[in-house]
Image (cartoon, coloured by chain):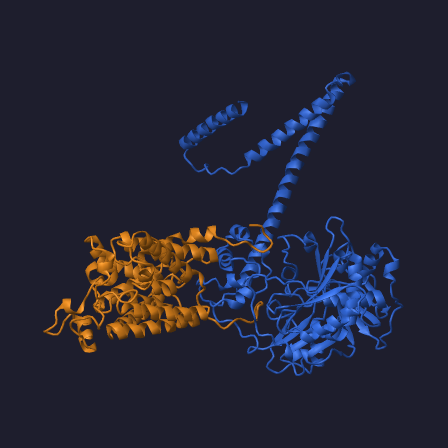
Amino acid sequence: MSQSPYISGSTSVSVIMLKVLLALVPGIVAYVWVFGGGVLVSLTLASITALVSEGVMLKLRNRPVRPFLMDGSALVTAWLLALALPPLAPWWLVVVGTLFAIVIAKQLYGGLGYNPFNPAMVGYAVLLISFPVIMTQWPAPLALAHAQLGFADQLHYIFSRGLPVDVQVDAITSATPLDYLKTQLKLQHALADISQAPVFGVVGAKGGELVTGAYLLGGLYLLQQRIVTWHIPVAFLAMLALVAGASSLLDPVHYAGAGFHLFSGASMLCAFFIATDPISGPTTPKGKLLFAAGIGLLTWLIRTYGGYPDGVAFAVLFMNICVPLIDAYTQPRVFGHKL
Amino acid sequence: MISTLFKFHGGVHPPEHKLESAATPIVEVPLPQRLVLPLRQHVGNVPKLQVAVGDHVLKGQLLAIADGMISASVHAPTSGTIVSIDEQLIPHASGLPDLCITLQADGEDRWVEHRALEYRDLPKAAVLEALRAGGVVGLGGATFPSHVKLREDAQHPVRTLILNGAECEPYITCDDRLMRERADQIVRGIEIMQYLLGAERCVVGIEDNKPEAAQAMRDACRLSSIPIEVATVPTLYPGGGAKQLIKVLTGLEVPSGKLPTEIGVQCFNVATAYTVHRFIHHGEPVISRVVTVTGKVARPGNFEVPLGMSIAELVQAAGGAAPESTGFVMGGPMMGFNLPSAEVPVVKATNCIIASAPDLFPPLPPAMPCIRCARCADACPVNLQPQELYWFAKSSNLEKARDYHLFDCIECGCCSYVCPSRIPLVQYYRYAKSEILAADKAKQAADLARERNEFRLARIEREKQERAAKHAQKAAGAKADVAGDEAKKAAIAAAMARAQAQKAEVVPQNTADLPPAVQEEIAGIDARREAVNEEKQEN
């Protein structure tokens, strides 16, 4: 027997990762409800790719395979990436993104615990830069689509891009609200008119806001289970709401409000699941606040002024770069020391 | 009456496991045949032996007397004969043997002449001296000689005297039982401590998982001649750490690297107050203590144990260890250590013995990499960043570890306890601390050796000069006695300069293998650099 302490708590890395996966389930259910079962195919493809590539890489790196496959971290990366991609993305897009996330962004940096960048976001950013058209081609929510694809049709579309004879691509896709907003604003349309478009729901995207709400639900579960602390979700959402709210207050014609930003795109997914990745994030309480506020601000900036409809991935990656600096300058006061 | 309580950062709630041993009263164990008494059972100097092999001693007789200020005496727990004085295994985390006195009991248990001390009639210094001779040390685990902490210090007067009855470690209940059963005697001890320190306020801190003990102490304090508060503090490990308890009760933080007296506080374990009372009011030195025996034993409980009794015998008194038991831990599961053998004796620091088994303390699974989840930082009572310290310790970046306040770590084990990757963090910190201390020591030794050598070279040179000067004087006759001291100083300076030059010469040259042309070039460069340096110095 070694040295004290001789007892330890019950939370292990696997437990943490499993609870994160569990917290994603409501979001996935809502996703299927809104967009159909295609996302389940993406999730399965990403999971298999992640586990296989992680296993192969571990073997190549002479690391024990079983404990690292069992830790569940590869699945978390796979699910986050799959949920961030358009649900009817072609199979190879999912595979390539997952491979990049696991092999390059995670394993080549040393595997679990050593990746400076959020692997899922690296995978996403690579796909977005390499295949911008596919990456911004979102299927319309089932309620809005001009043609309905059954699960078998969705499968067929994912694997061979083939559609039933009477269906055109335009009939099943639509611009996302973030995308739509951006292009319409560029065309000098007023926000009040733009938001009358059918793609908009009560606060965010039609249908999408339901998924976002489900992510929020899962996020609250993570908070309650103490898997994540309040710092990152609160700071991210508060900052995003603050800048969006302030800008729309000053110029309601050209800037969308806080509610829209909070319930559109990947905001909730980012707040509770992406920005809270401990490995690529800061560790100090103050650091977490800074880090998440930075992501919130950057997300809004990229959405509003950048070249891409959503800015979460780049905002997270940029703030990942700042983590060592943030940690170094936010060290808390140690007991018995002056500040 | 009870003032506001404060919070310290972090802390954990491990399963308490106190009920097993806290239910039954303290049992006095039967007198053992053989007692092994390590000379050093405290922090500080080894006491001086006062007996020899073959001597017959009485119960309470002095066996070794405190040597120097920070030291404590050792006494015979029963009457008998000294059969050996040699190195034996002691209950220490190092597992190393130390000098011990072995006493064969004669079974009569006959006391040496002893009497109470009228402490109020004596100068305080005499009372402290008596406590030093009485072997009174802190019984909370640190075993620091108490008389040192009870001395009045004009520069740092003690305003608040804190009695630690928190007993925050799981399994341990010896203070709990002591407070329940002997509260009045603890209070007598507190009165003495208060008198010696001149403290204005006395507070007993007890975790709220010991309501009976708190009630007993409250009742006893009500009868005291001085006002003593009893504060129940939230159960939160390591709330019984002195610095943590002081923070909870006073809101003050002991500055890093300083003693509690810096902020006008002194802190003692309740069991220490009890021994102070036994010694002052009854003349009984510290020859026994209450020990919790729990874990995989037939009858867990608390025992009044003579110091020197072997752990194996003590465990027998608790009904023996279960067959599946694989060893014994001294102290609690968070900060205790595995005993090297069951034959080691009970010492003043022995507060608890846990018969361990794999299902009680399961071996850690292989550690996973740190995922920077910062649960350790959230749990750290000192507000350190354990994940950073781990990183620095692992990469032997010891300077950085020191910068991140490694030496403020109290090794409470909270970080290891919560780590989801099951990294034995505390072990890394212990390693890093010992490495840094060893490096510091080595550096000090090297500095000293270098200074000595330089001094020696200078001296040799000076002596040579002096001899030469003497010869010259002799040759020139007494008339040349002019320059005197001036010449001597100049000679010494010259000698120092030569010593410096000699030192410079032995600086290794890595140019020896180069072709002569290159060597010449290097020599040329060196010469030019030398010239420039000289010029700079002149300017």
* Residue B402 seen by the camera: yes
> In the picture, residue B204 is in which quadrant?
bottom right
> Where residue B120 appears, x then y in whole percent?
86, 59
> Where residue A64 appears, x then y in whole percent?
40, 69
* Residue B291 seen by the camera: no
Q: Is residue B168 above or below residue B263?
A: below
Between A187 and B115, the one nearer to me in the picture: A187
Horizontal side of A249 relative to B301 (left or right) equals left
> Where residue B184 appears, x then y in whole percent?
78, 71
Q: Is residue B309 above or below residue B429?
A: below
Q: Most extreme residue toward the top, as rendered?
A: B479
Chain B, which colour? blue
* Residue located at (73% from left, 23% from top): B485
Horizontal side of A290 relative to A79 (left or right) equals right
> In the picture, residue A335 is in which quadrant?
bottom right
* Residue located at (59% from left, 61% from top): B8
Between A295 and A186, the one nearer to me in the picture: A186
> In the picture, residue B91 is in which quadrant?
bottom right
> Where residue A242 appears, x then y in whole percent?
37, 56
Q: Is residue A316 above or below residue B16?
A: above
Chain A, which colour? orange
